[in-house]
Structure formats: C-alpha cells, structure tokens
Amino acid sequence: MKFFSGDLRGVARLLFFGTTERLETTPTFQDPKGTNKPFNPHYQRHILPFVREFESKRIVALQKHTVRLRISAFLFLAMGTLFFLLSTGAFPEFDAHMQILKMKFQEMNVKTEGDPLLFLIVTSFSLLFFWTFRPVMNYNKAVKDNIYPNIFSFFGSDFSYKAESPLSVDSLEKSDIIPGHDDETSEDYIKGRHADVGIEMFETKLTETSGSGKNRRTTTVFRGLFILLDMNKNFSGKTIVVKDWGKIGNWMNGVGRKLEVVRLEDPKFEDMFEVYSSDQVEARYLLTTSFMERLIGVRDLIGSDRIQCSFYDNKILLMVSLSSDRFEVSSIYRPTTFIDECKGILAEMDAIFALIDHLKLNQKIGL
Amino acid sequence: MSITTLVILGLIVAVPYFWYVSIIGRRNKALEALSSIDVQLKQRLDLIPNILKIAKKFMEHEKGLMEEITSLRTRAESAYNKNDKQAVVEHIAAAEQLSAKMGQLMVSVENYPTLKSDQTMVQAMQTYNEVEAQIAAARRFYNAAVNELNNAVQIFPGSVIAQMAHVTEMPFFKAEEAVHEPVDAGKFLG
C-alpha cells in the first residue's frame, strides 16, 4: 500500500502552517453524461454516510502526522548537520570510535554498506520516515477496509474487495507465465462476476534480489495486475501466450518448457507474441483468428503494451504490466469525499468489463 | 586421413541425414494433424443421426436435404489410405461437402420456430457448433503442418531427399467452393 501519495504541497502546508483543507460542503458525485447506470444514487446511499466520519478520522490522523513530521524534520536537520560536520573531520576523535564500531559490526557479522555511520543514519531515516507516515498508512488502510467494499458493491452483490490479497502469485504457478522472483507484495483483491464471467484479480509487485554484500541489488521483475477469468470454452491442456523476444530470446525462453511452440496465421500476432501449448489443436481452438485480433486490441483497452496470458484449468489468466499503482486512496491532505477513489475504481473496472466484453468471454461461440 | 577431411565427410553424411529426418518428422506431423481432424470429423458424424432424427419430426419439406446428408455421411465414414494423396483429397472433399450441407440444414432450422426452440435441438446444435469449432482448429493445425511439409519437399535440396525417401506433398484442407461464393441475401430473405 502506498503511504505517500506524492502530494508535496500538502506535506509542506502541514509542516510549515499546520493546516490542511477541510470538507466544507456535502459532496455530490457527478456522473458523466450518457452513463447507463449512474453511480450517484449508490454514492449517496453507501458512501456519503461515511464521509463526515472519515473526515474526522483524517483530521486526527493528520494531527498525529503533523507532530511526527515536525519531529522528523528537526531530527533530519540535526542528524544531517552532524553527519556533515563529522564527514569533514570536525571531530577527529570521533573517527576512532567509528573504527571500533566497525570492528564490533564485523564481530557481530553485520554487513554494512561502507561507513557504519552512514549505515546508521540511513537506517534511522528509513525508520523515521515510516514512523512519520504511519498515521497516513493507517488511515488509507481504514479507507480500503471500510469504504472500498461499499464502492465495489455497486457492480453487484457478488463483488467483494479485500485490501490484502488472499490469493498469492504462488497459487498461479501452474499457469507457467509467472516470472522468477524472490519476493511478492500483493494487494487489492477483487472478486465478482460480470456478464456471467467469474473474475478474480489482484495487484502485485514481484522483485528479485541478486548479488551479495555491496553488490546486492533488488530489481522489480513485474508490477501490475493478475486477472483470472472464466473461459467460455472447455479445454484440458495448457496454452500460454507470452511476449515475443525475437528468435534467440524465444529459443532461450522455450528451453526447459514441456510445451510445444505453436505457429499461428496472424503475422501481427506472431510478431507480438510467442505461443506454447500442450496441444496444437486445442491452442488453435482457443486462439481463433478473431480471438487473436481481440487480444491485440486488449492493449488499447488496458493501456498497457505488456500483456501475457495463460489458458489452463478452464480459465484465462491475464498478466498485465502497469507502470503505476491502481486502486489507491487519494491524498490524505485533501478533504475526504471519496469521489476520486470512486472515479478511479469505476474507470478501472470499466476497463476490465470492456476487456471481458471485447474478448467475448461471456459468449459460448466457436469464434 | 586428416581431421579436416573427416569433418567434411562427416558433414556430407550428417547434413543429408538430418535433412531426411526433418522431412520425415514433418510428414509424420502432417499425418498426426490429419488424424486429429479425423477424430473431430468422427465426432461430427456421430452427432448427425441424432440431429436428423430431431429435425425430421418438424422439417417435412427438407426431406431431400436430409437424404443428401445421410448419403454424404456414409461416404465420409468410409476408410481411406492416409499415404495416398488422392484418397486424402477425396476424404477432405467429402468432409467439406458434408459440412456445407449441414450448414444449409442449420440455416433451414431458422424457418421452423418450433424446432428452433426445441430443447433437444438447441442442445444438439450447441454440441454440433462446439465440434465444428474443434474441426476448424484441427484444420488450421493440419494446414500449418502441411505447409511446413510442402515447403520442405518442394524447395531444393529437400526435394531431392524427399524424392529419394518417397515423401510427397499433401493436400491442404480447403474450404468448400460454396463458401467462397458471394452470399445471395435474396435467397435467404425470399
């Protein structure tokens, strides 16, 4: 969960003036013109009753946050000044103590990144930053736990939302499209049905750690959405559609796979994707010429050009790479209306529903 | 004999051999694909009597069409030699003719509302459509495999090796001619 929305203006206003914008009037949700199913009645009934309560919670959280922000700012300046003076040799006798500390770290087998003082300061700043934004995190979590389910109920009684995902990426290993990773952070789990198609999705970030000691690096191997949908065809094997990495990349990607390469007729599809399957006929049964065209069109719907999918267990798993977090709570430094959250969720779910309609997953046809 | 000579001799033997292996592999893949189609065609053949039985109760005016379908079904059921190009062509032609006639029957069903809403007919048609989708997929796999085989057999020096190994081209699974003709809407709308 993001704990800092990037609202630097809000932070500065709080830090220097101790003030924030407050909710003055009762908010209303403006549905766009021509909306088939207006959201405003749902907002009035299920979201608005909580606005005042959460506005009070927001103010309390900001009060705590302000105190911590000011303490942190002071400590940051003090420690920064001290470190600057020490590093310029203003206190030579301090260097001797640092050498002793370094030896102590080595005895305790604690690996430090270079200078132990720098290590201490970086660690302290990290803890301070976390402590400062803890009230914001708690507020955001409360919004996700209490308000988001009410927003998602707009899509139907069978829609549910959980801030922490009960589904993990490990449960999807069978799909054969999960990239290798060491760590996973999953959130925003959504489950429901649209046009009689079951949907399960969650947001995740996968990271990989390489090297050791000073060369230890953590890289993000994937960030985006996993969307699991009911497939409208029965099949028993597995077919995966992954990004085309060129001849050598594809060859390397195919090493160790128990699936065969499937060459399909659509040249544009073949340029973008590489298909592997346990059954050549079944792969073509699933990836008809029109379905291939639709899959290419998914890029425009989702706003991502990195999509991979896997057909297994009568489901289709879509792996959509995104550059930013979705389903996030808006800035705590602005009045609580939940309108931005509602708009964001409506837009995201519209894209998902458009995806299901576009792929015609709700229709039992041979196309 | 020097190492260079041995390597060259080895290549002279190995390259044609692996080329031959590749051609045989592609031919076997095409035969495997043809078998996949036959599995689906068999499923379709098994469905047809049930569909005709249901349709007969309602479609008295389509007797001629149903008799044609029955006769085509018998022809499509007969065994054939997969290694005989002409036999494969005739087998594919029979399957496509049957597909075309069944297509006509499905369109005719639209003129009989009682039949169209009959639950057993609805289910039979859904199953038939599923099988048609499988046949379409199997046909695409077959054509892809035949394309690879034919390329290997026609392009020199593969053509020489194929001739020596008695491996010939195989026919594509082409759509029935009627499918390529423009649709006359007047025929359907009256």
Image: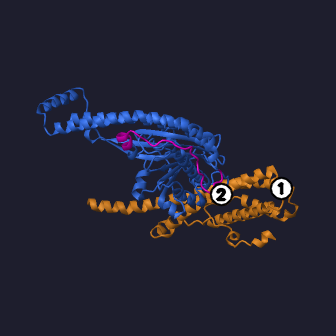
Region rendered in magenta: A11-37
What is the x, y in percent for residue A247? Answer: 41, 59
Q: Residue A23: within the magenta? A: yes
What is the x, y in percent for residue B156? Answer: 46, 70
Dot 1 and dot 2 residues touching (CB under 8 Å): no
Q: Which mark is residue B115?
A: 1
User: Residue B158: in sight, yes or no?
Assistant: yes
Q: Which chain carries label 2?
A: B
Total number of numbered discs in the rendering? 2
What is the x, y in percent for residue B131? Answer: 68, 54
Q: Which mark is residue B135?
A: 2
In screen coordinates, is A10 left or right of A106? right
Closest to the observer, B15 or A211: A211
Closest to the observer, A207 or A60: A60
Could you tell me the amino acid type at mark 2?
Ile
* Picture colour for chain A: blue
Q: Is residue B152 above or below residue A291?
A: below
**Secondary element type, mark 1:** helix
Could you tell me the amino acid type at mark 1?
Leu
User: Looking at the rendering, which quadrant does residue A111 occupy?
Assistant: top left
Counting residues from the start of the chain, the first of labels 1 and 2 encountered is 1
**Secondary element type, mark 2:** helix
Q: Residue A110: within the magenta? A: no
Closest to the observer, A271 or B105: A271
Give the residue furthest to the left. A92
Q: What crowding class fits label 1: few (fewer than 14 Cα within 10 Å), some (14-19), or many (20 or more)?
A: some
